[in-house]
Structure formats: C-alpha cells, structure tokens
Image (tube, rainbow, N blue to C red):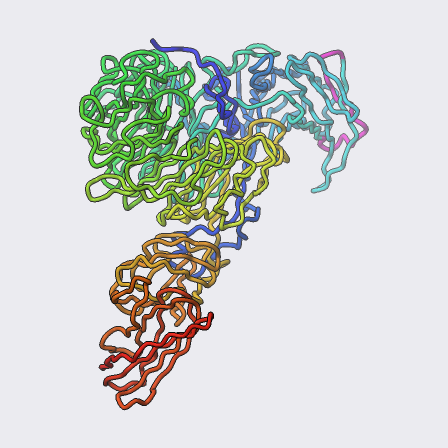
Amino acid sequence: MKRKGMNARWNKRGHMKSVSKFICLILLTNLIVCFTGISFLTAGVSIPSKAAALKESGQDKKMEAGKKSKAEEAYGKLPLCFESNHGQTDASVKFLARGKGYTLFLTSTEAVLALKTAAGSKAEGLDVVRMKLKDANIDPVFQGMDLLSSQSSYMTGNDPKKWQTKIEQYSKVEIKQIYPGINMVYYGNNGQLEYDFVVAPGANPGLIKMIFKGAKNLELDQKGNLVLNLQEGRLAFNAPTLYQKTGSKRDIVAGRFVLSGNEQVSFEVAAYDKKKELVIDPTLAYSTYLGTTVADRVNSMYVDTLGNVYLTGETAGTGFPGTAGHYQNFNKGGAYDAFVLKINPAGAVEWGTYLGGGGVDVGRSITVSGTGIIYICGATTSAGAAFPTTVIPSAASYQAVNNGGTDAFLTAIAASGNSLVYSMFIGGAGEEFAFGVAVDSTNNAYVTGGTTSNNTTLPVTGGFQGDNAAGVGDTHENAFVAKFNSAGTVQFFTYLGGTTIGGGGTGEAFDPSLGGTHGNAIALDSSNNIYVTGKTVAGFPIYPLGTEFPYVGIAYKTTISGAPDAFVSKISTNGATLLYSTYLGGSGMAMGFAIKVDSVGNVYVAGDNDSDNFPEVTIDMPKVGQTTIAGGPFDCFIMKMKLDAAGSLDGVYCTFLGGKAWDHVNALAVDSFGNAYVTGRTASDDFVSISPASINTPLDSVYGAVAKAFVTVIGPDGSTRILNSYIGGVSDQEGRGIGLDAENNIYVSGWTTSTDFPTAIPFYEANKGTYDGFVMKISATSPATLAAPAITGINPNVGPIAGNTTVTITGSGFSNVAFATGVKFGSVNAASYVVISDTKITAKTPAHAAGIVDVVTTNTVGSSPAVTADRFTFFVTPAISSSGDFEPFIFPSPVTGSTAGIAYYMTGSGTVKIKIYNEVGNMVSSLEEIKSLGSQGSTLNVSNLAPGIYFHIVSMTYDDGGIKKYSKRKFAVTR
C-alpha cells in the first residue's frame, strides 16, 4: 500500500530525509525566471584542456591558480524578472516575479508579497503581505518593459491545451495612471525589489496612500524605514528616495513615510519643482525579514560541451495566496513542481520550465542528448490527471496514470524548453522513485531507481529479472532499470535486487541514502551497455540464476559485510542479460551515489564508506592516495575499474577522500585524460589538509563552518589530487552537481546559507540567512600562463626491456602533467606515474625494445624538449648475481649509431669511470660520472669511432672508499 505522507526527518549525516520540509538548495522560485539567487565564482586551476593539449599557447586571460578572480563580464549578471500571467497562477494576477525568498503578484487592485518562512518555525509556510492603493484606479493598464531573451514554460497537468509555454519575461512592469498623472514602475536593482511612483508635472503625490494587510503592526524606525512586523519576522521598506532629473543629474527632494493609523502609509514631500517629473523610490529591504528561508532545491546538473548548464530539482508552485497574514499550507501537498532550467555559456538564463501536478513533483536527475533533448527523471505524488503525461502517436505512453502514492517519472523536453517529446509515470501499487537517467546517441533513455511493487502491477518487459525478489510490501524493495526509445516506448523493464527486506521509507524517494536496494546512478559505455550503482541491504543476489544474480567473471565481493553495501551492475543494452554484478563494501556501511564510464571503458564509482577495509575484494584493487578512513561516520570513496578480456572488472585504484568528521559525495564527472571530478559536502575541518596534498592551491583552505561544499580532482592513477578545495563561507553549504565543458572548465552547483559565500559577481551583498544556490565555474588554467615541462635528470637511467623499473624524473613544470599520455619512454606510455611535485615525478618503465630513448613529459602547454639528461636505456637483462650485480655491457650490439649505451651496477654511491680503447690499446674516449646505488647507465658518444673492434673498461670509486674495476670487454662498431 502506498504511503501518501512525506514527513521530514534528518539522518545522522545531516541530510533531510524527505522533501515536504526540505529547504531550498538553490533559490528556484527566483532562479527559474531570472536566476538571481545564485552566486558565481570563477578561479583557475591547472586542469588539462582538450584544446590546450593540441596547442602550445592559449588566448584566455590569465587566472592565477587557486585565487578568487573576477568572473567573465557577463556571466551571472542577471536581473530580477517579471513574467506575464498566461494561466500559470490565479486569473487576477497580471504579472509575477520571484525574488530572494518571496514571490510578488501584481493584480489590478493590489501587490501581494508571499514571503517564505523558516522550516521548523512555529508557523511554517508563508507570510502574506498585501499592499493596496487607497482610492486608486481599479482597472489600470499594465505594460511589461525591457523584454528579456529568457522565457518560462509551465507544463502542469496532462492536458497540453492548458500548458503555458514561451511566456515572455521583462525586467520592469509599468502600471499606468494608478492615480491621475501617476504611474507605478516595479523593477529589480541588484536583486532588490523596488517600485517607483512616477509623478507627472502638475500631478499630486498627496493622492498616494498605501494600505498594508497581513502585518501585526507597522512602525517607522529611527532611520525612517517602514517596518512591518509579521508572524515570523520583520519586513522593511527603506526610507524613500525622492528626486527630479535635470539632464542626467538627480536633484534630491526631501521626503519621508508617514503613518496614518495601523495600516495606512503615505508620503510627506517637501517643496519641489512641479513643472518637472517627480520620482518616489522606496526599496524592499528583504534582508530584514529574519524568518525567511527558501523551499526549493536543485538536485542535478548537466553541462554540455558548449558550456550550457541544465539544472533540475523541485520548486514551490505559483499558487496565489487567498488571504492576508500567514498562509500555512502554501508549500505543502501539491505546491512542489519539478523544474528544468537552461543557462547559456554567458551565464544568462535562456528558459525555465515547470513540470508538475497536484502533488509533490521532484526532478532527481538530468541529462541532454546530442540533439539537445533534455531528459529528467524523479518522483511524483501527483495523480494522472494532474501530472503532464503524453500520448505517443505510435503507441500509448508507457504509463499515463499514477498507480497511487509515489511513482517515478521520466520526461523528455524539446531543446526549446517549451514542449514535451514525451512524459510518463513509472510505477505500480508500491512506492517508486527514479534517481538516475542516461541517454544514448539515438535518444534511447535509460532510467534507474527503486520500487516496492512487483510484476503484478509493475510488469517486466524483456528484462533479465522477472520480479521483485524481495516480495511485496512497504519495505520489500528492489532496484529497477528501464529503457525507452526516442518516442517513449518501453524497450525493457527489469528488476535488480535480492530477497532481503529493507527500505521503502516515506522519505526515500527524495534521499538516495535512505531505504534498501535501489539504483542511484546510471551510465553507458560506447556499446550502450548499462552500468548502475546504488545501495543494497543483505541478500543482493550475485549467483546463480534464479536465486542470485548471474555474472560473468569474478565478482569483487560476493557476500555483504556491512548494511548496506554499494553495488555495481553491468547490463546488456537490451536488458536481457546481467553481464556483471558485485557488492562494493567493507565491514561497515557503503553506498554508491555516482557512476561514469570513459571512452575506453574504464568505470568510475563514487560514494560513501565508513570502513578501512573497503573494498573487501577477492581480486586486486590497489588502494592509493588516502588509503584509510580519517574519521567518521563516513568518508567518500572513488574507485576506477577496467574490463579484462573475460569481461570482469579489474581494479585500477581505490582512494578515500575525507577528514575526521563526516564527508559525503554527490556527483562525479570524468574528462578524456582520466581525471575524476567530485563534489559533495564535508563537516571535516581537516578535509583539505589530509594527504595527499592538492597540487593546485585550494580555492579555499579554511574550514570555519557548519559544513562546506568541496570540489576535488583526482589524477588518472588515483594517487594524485590535482585540486582539493573547500567551497563556501562560515555557515552551511553542499555541492550537488558537477560537470565539464569542452575545455575542461569545471562547473559546480549547490546551495549555501553562508553570508560570506565567495562570489565573483554577487547578486546580493550577502546571504541574509536564507538558503541560496550557487553555480561556480572553475577555469582550467590558460596554457599561456604555464610553461612546458623540462627534464633535468632521470635516476636510474637504465633498465631491462621487460620494464617495471621505478625511476625518478626531476625537472620543472610537472604540476600540470595529469593525464594518461603525460609520461612516455620513447613512443610508449609509462606503465604508471605519480606527480610528486612540480619538480618531481616517479614512474614505472613500460616494456620496450632494447636501446636508448628520450623520456618525454607533456602538459597542456607542450612537451619537454629532448636533451641528454632525459635519456633512458633499455637493455636485455644480463646474468645478475644474488646481490643484483652484473657485468657492464654496451648496447646495441653491434653499435650502429653515433651513441651507445653502457649498463652497469653500482653497489653504492660514487664515481664511475668508463674508458674506450681501440684494438692496439690506445684510449679513444672516456667518461666520468657520479652515480647512486643500483642499476645505472651512461650514454657514450661514439660518433668519432670508425667501424671496428673496441674495448671498454669500467671502474667504480665509491664514497666509502671502496674500489671496483671490471676487466676489459670487447664490442663492435659498424656503420
């Protein structure tokens, strides 16, 4: 039986367990129209850029790594916006606008402010203030001014005829002849709502009388500000500014508010030139409304290669309050809609779209196809007649009605943002919710989530698991995976899970850390095989078919140790075969929240874990970088795996990310170089200082907060942190989404309550206690600000042709060497390497043919030049003694070029002398070098040697006084 309620609870990590009281992560009631509740920050870090990897210099402006810098001039400069009413709210409303914690409705007879109150307050919901003009024109003319390029659409309910699309937006609204000769103009100024009374020459400002309803009382403070004492706070209008213009100059006119009784306010105006226009300009000082917070949330972000940003989540609806005073139920039981927002590369909103019905509608995941179609999935409690579903011309929508309670949904929106390609429910008699969506090149959409239904009411179509293995009931939960073609027709639907009961809680549809077995994220490889990660309780099936999941190859972990464990499952593109499935976990709890697959099939998983022995695996999984849990209750984990020839996943690395308190990861992105980007939330004051240290200077290294968002970039082998930084101010914040554009600029979205959140172009001087959203763009450092690397030494500089020799490379410019082809021995990539610092790299040699090669390091600027110091000699392994010693030898044999290599073994540090003699005993060449312990080599210049037979004698004088001399050995030179 489905549960209707969604009561909020907090779990031990500080995450809200439900949505009905979940405070906004991004100010979406404002954001959808004009995005003014979001702060922007750009900074530079040394991240490889695709374009930069192909050129030697860049044209971008310098952004010093790790320093806060000014954003692009246009990025984030977004005005307060007004949209005309096309049916998205009550018919009496002419225009509406959303600001920092409020919605403004303009009708013919009044202006209505709906002010959101704090979650957990005594009277949670809205304070409603109505401002009427006494004896004013009851039918004035409204006119939008300064048309904006952005639009909004409302696709609520399942009747397309009632949808409102392509709604125009304006930066100002003028109300004409509100009094004889007096107009009103509403507009925004730096995020603040302002309204002007424009008094024409000869008109009488004494006619203006404002009646305020909904306040307990009105008062004037010592500065002349008008203060309205409300149920949950104080709302103030700054003392008015009065002026007349002489050309471009403003001549200030004295004036003030005047109170008459408990509700009426007018203006006292000093003498002024009545032959000129007079402007009276009060400003809403919304920051004085102490009880406010915002009831909206961003849950997912997608960034395309051009730098367009797409967001989804939930937002308070546009319902028009019916009475003045506190409005308890405005944001409950049907006032949450899902939304989609598109922001272009310049930071301007192109459009925003609402999706919803009469219940709670939440967008959980978003992706965009190559043709620009936007796909979102989530959960809804709206009934079938209320939520937007479509009838596909070729076939009925997969599910056109809600089967009761909470259902998952999948919606495809046209690139314009103002029409649906298709939209459907996914649900049975139990609870359903969708957490992840992916799309392939032919616009097939793939969805994962969780369900407590079975195949009686949520039937399987072509899937490998025919039913919910946990049975039927509120806590009988399995994951599901489904595929829909470009028209929205189901291609397969399958369950994914075991027999153990657990999950299905009322808040689970809106918090992926809750409940039992469900998929949290989904990704595709180049063959459109499907990869799912999530969390599962004991009994997640692994093997054999019928009782446990079938698998190919060896699973990392076939039994659960903690409760829950994370999991990774690979499914064929047609859904008929489970190709691979495994637990990921240790002795404690583990959960997977994000998964990506790169172009060569490497699989990356990010999640939370609280055990040092994570992952307990039956095959090799190298733990690198941070290898132990620094604290509790959770640290983040990032894993990289690759497929072997048999189809099993082999471990590349596993690393932890976290400090001494709890840490949580939400999102993951991967670039073409194999770097992994993650964001989330941490309560650890040592998060940034935990080893390994960030190569780039953190954007913010000081904690001093309730919790901070973070952004971390992990190098290709997992051992290097290219960037590890806090994001935020002194209060609370969380990173919810992360993405990359074609230049590997990083985009992070999330929420903050901090008053000092760093902004490049702030929309408000400070956050005044509400939940504000943010979008941060972190620029990959311009190649013009970096130098190509240079090598000054390699030790040792010889090794066997089989490879696996550990060498230390010294030089400069290594910090930006951070991708798979960053170190090469000749034309062959290093087997592995670790950037220790800007001047030091350790690398393992690959297998290579015998000979002398140049070692080359490459960053986004270019490659290190070939010099004598970068040469490495591969040799055929000679007979080696038990001590590791071997006889010196020259190669290649015979010598055919102008140089030759000589390999030898040093039993300690000292000086090696090499002398070359011809057949008659004359010395023709010599070389003396200082070497350290181990296999070593030198490069000999033999360009002056004629073809013939020669001899070499090698002697070592060690620092401890020891001497060793080898007898002469013969070699040949040919040309």
Q: Where is residue 807 drawn, in percent x and y? A: 38, 60
Of residues 240 and 583, the one nearer the viewer is: 583
Q: Is residue 675 above or below residue 963?
A: above
In the picture, the quarter occupied by the N terminus is: top left
Q: Is residue 605 above or below residue 717?
A: above
Magenta residue check for 222: no
Q: Left of 18 or right of it: where is 287?
A: right
Magenta residue check for 273: yes
Of residues 117 and 78, the one nearer the viewer is: 117
Q: Left of 472 or right of it: where is 659?
A: right
Q: Left of 246 or right of it: where is 324?
A: left
Q: Where is residue 177 drawn, in percent x and y? A: 63, 22
Magenta residues, dominant SS class:
loop
What residue is at 65 percent from the left and 27 percent from the top? Answer: 287
Instruction: State the extent of the magenta-drawn residues as a range.
Output: 261-278
Tally of numbered tags = 0
What residue is at 53 percent from the left and 20 percent from the top? Answer: 94
Q: Left of 819 or right of it: where is 221?
A: right
Of residues 333 and 495, the one nearer the viewer is: 495
Q: Residue furthest right?
A: 271
Q: Where is residue 941 drawn, in percent x and y? A: 34, 79
